[in-house]
Image (spheres, grey):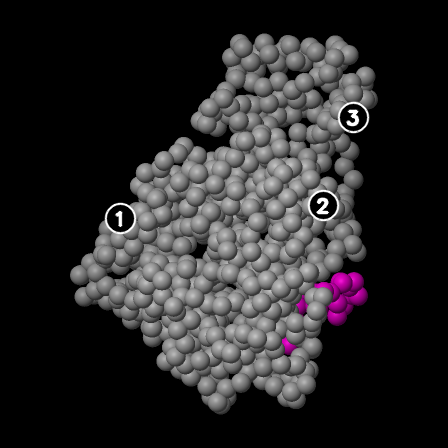
Amino acid sequence: MWRYGVSILKPYHYVHCKSYPANSKSNLTKTPVIKSSNSWTLMTTITESDVGILCFISHLPGFRGILKQRYSDFIVNEVDTEGNVVHLTSLDAPPEVAVQEVETKIPDQLNKCYASEIIKFRSLAGDTDADRLEAFINQITSGSEEDICPIVLSPDSDKSHRTAMHNFFKENLRFLVTDTVDGPDSSSKCIRVRLNSGNNNKGRNSKKRKERGDKPYDSRGSSHWPEHLGKFLRFHLYKENKDTQEALGLIGKLLGIQPRSFGFAGTKDKRSVSTQRVTVFKQHASRLAALNERLIGIKVGDFCYVEDDLLLGQLLGNWFTVILRGIVADSEETIKASAESLGRHGFINYFGLQRFGSGSIPTHRIGATLLRGEWQAAASTILDPREGERDFVSKAREYYKETGDIEGTLRQLPRHLVAERAMLQGLKKCPGNYLQALKAIPRTLRMMYVHSYQSYLWNHAASMRVEKYGSNEVVLGDLVYCKGNDAEKVKVVPTEHEDNNFEDAYDYSQLDEISGTDLPEGKNNLVKAITAVDISTGNYTIEDVVLPMPGSRIIYPVNDIANVYHDMAKKDGISLTESVHNTKEFSITSMTGSYRHVFQKPIDFEWELLSYSDGTIALSETDLDKIAKTKPVNLVKEEKPTNGTEGQDPSDHMEHIESFEDDKKFSTDNVEVEGSREAEPPQIHSLPESNSLGTQKALKLAFTLPASCYATMAVAFHKALNQ
């Protein structure tokens, strides 16, 4: 059986780089045989060199150990924008204050005359739309036996004007609700107006609406909401052995709401215990708190109502508590030296393998297809069968490819395949419209593909920067954030964590318009290229060096590292300066771009060498453990032994990590620190029975990394393959 070795904590301050071979033998990594439900399949996975991770540093002796023997060996706590570490501290909902509904009842509203409102609307929208609205209101108030169908107002490309229109209805015609739909061309939108079917109207049309399955315009939340409460419920999501999308999918199913109802700042990996903030639109805390008895491996708590939802990137970083078990080293001094070196020198700030998805379908390849405007090819790549998946998933994909039966495929596909299910629903509504099907994928998920391609280019540029110029000092043309009184004002761009483009942020109803959500404001960061004067004065160090994520408002290094971006994009048929289509969210030229530090040190770094004799005993305390000390908690755990026992979920297995001084291959595990991603491939490895070997050593690490930094790049890395 194949055994993987990964050297631990080899600091990234002395450099060894791989070259860029087209078909080098060193780029080929055999992967373990994965046992599916009915057969054994040889998986094909991407390697680090496939995504530009080509350089590493190795000057200290390494040591062996096991990462994620238990998923509680990898604890992730989000750090919010104020620098607070997010913990689950309470499972109880706050007391609900009974508030008399202040909104006018619908029957009373229907008895009014709306002449004055129509006059006001005419001045805002013009005669055509005012006449259309007047006829619509007359139909409603007349008690007509006919079905009351929504009306769609004239196309409007002015977002601020559309917002004013939405607000008019909220303030003057509360028995009507509005949302935004696509206009006749790509540059325009239309406002749709309909009767609020979530109201208390018991009139003659209510039965017909019920019979035809008419739903409220916004199925994400209550149609009646107390004005004293913020529109969003924020809560802390605690999960064990679940990824973020999966956990929220389960919660959404129990609440009967759509995935787009939820907002979060970043996804956390499945093989971990994590706590993060989540927002949901117009849901009461008591409803979510009641789910704690039903959810497996998930808890929600620390509820509060807020006015704004969370958006991807609205976090400072993540606090990690990592346990490396079964440590084998030539001496304790070797372990201590490696740990201290990581704290002092940091690591190359690559995007880890998790950024690029799983198996034979790396997300950056889908991103390249989207950037070329090849909608059908991108859709097929996402939906088609792929290697390494469980049999029932493969059968569902094969079934769709052979039959095109959307309903039958949806019945077979598991709910955690969010992108695939959303696309099929989109194709069901708009057959043959692959662009609309792609837009049906939740934004945070669909933007993963393009962001992944940006990351792919960044990794290659970082490797070339380290390979060509080393990691000790700045060189001419390097990019840095300006310091102090540096007068050269080159570029003002978002931070590396701000999302690039929020126009048309939602595929159907524009949440930023209908709910008044404000978009995050990134810091204004001035970026400049290093000059000879900068080098002579020593104002900048290697820690200041940044590289761009491609976009329309960034600059490239003023040296040959810039060529890496353009040359690699050109090989993929992509221009970084021109777009071949008009779909903004899938175009690099419509994105702002950002910058990312090439080198990163862990923050508040702590380490501790532990001894243990029972591999089933936790060596770190989770948030739920702390709550359970004061109050009994019913959490059904799914943690199992990880020795390849038949019948287990392959994704519940850890990685075996082992150091080799001169290894040329290295990899990461399945940790997703920030950003969205596809499900990770399961991996099974042969491991010793850890609780039968007597007293063993474990290394406990605790540190904070900024958002978008990968703990796996800080902790692991040089992979070797031995028989």
In this rendering, the answer to whether 541 lies above or below 576 is below
Q: Earlier in the sequence, mark 3 or mark 2?
A: 3
Q: CA distance from mark 1 to mark 3?
A: 61 Å
Q: Are marks 1 and 3 in contact (CB under 8 Å)?
A: no
Residue at 42% over, 38% down: 373
In the drawing, what numbered circle is on residue 253? 2
State the residue in front, 94 or 279: 279
Left or right: 333 with respect to 17?
right
In the image, residue 276 lies in the stretch drawn in magenta: no
Q: Earlier in the sequence, mark 1 or mark 3?
A: 3
Measuring from the top left, give residue 56's x and y in whole percent: 38, 71
Q: Mark 3 belongs to which amino acid?
A: Lys
* Labels 1, 3: front one: 3
In this rendering, the answer to whether 421 lies above or below 599 is above
Per the image, the residue denoted by label 1 is 489
Measuring from the top left, give residue 530's x and y in whole percent: 23, 58
Q: Are marks 1 and 2 in contact (CB under 8 Å)?
A: no
Measuring from the top left, give residue 533's x and y in whole percent: 18, 61
Per the image, the residue denoted by label 3 is 210
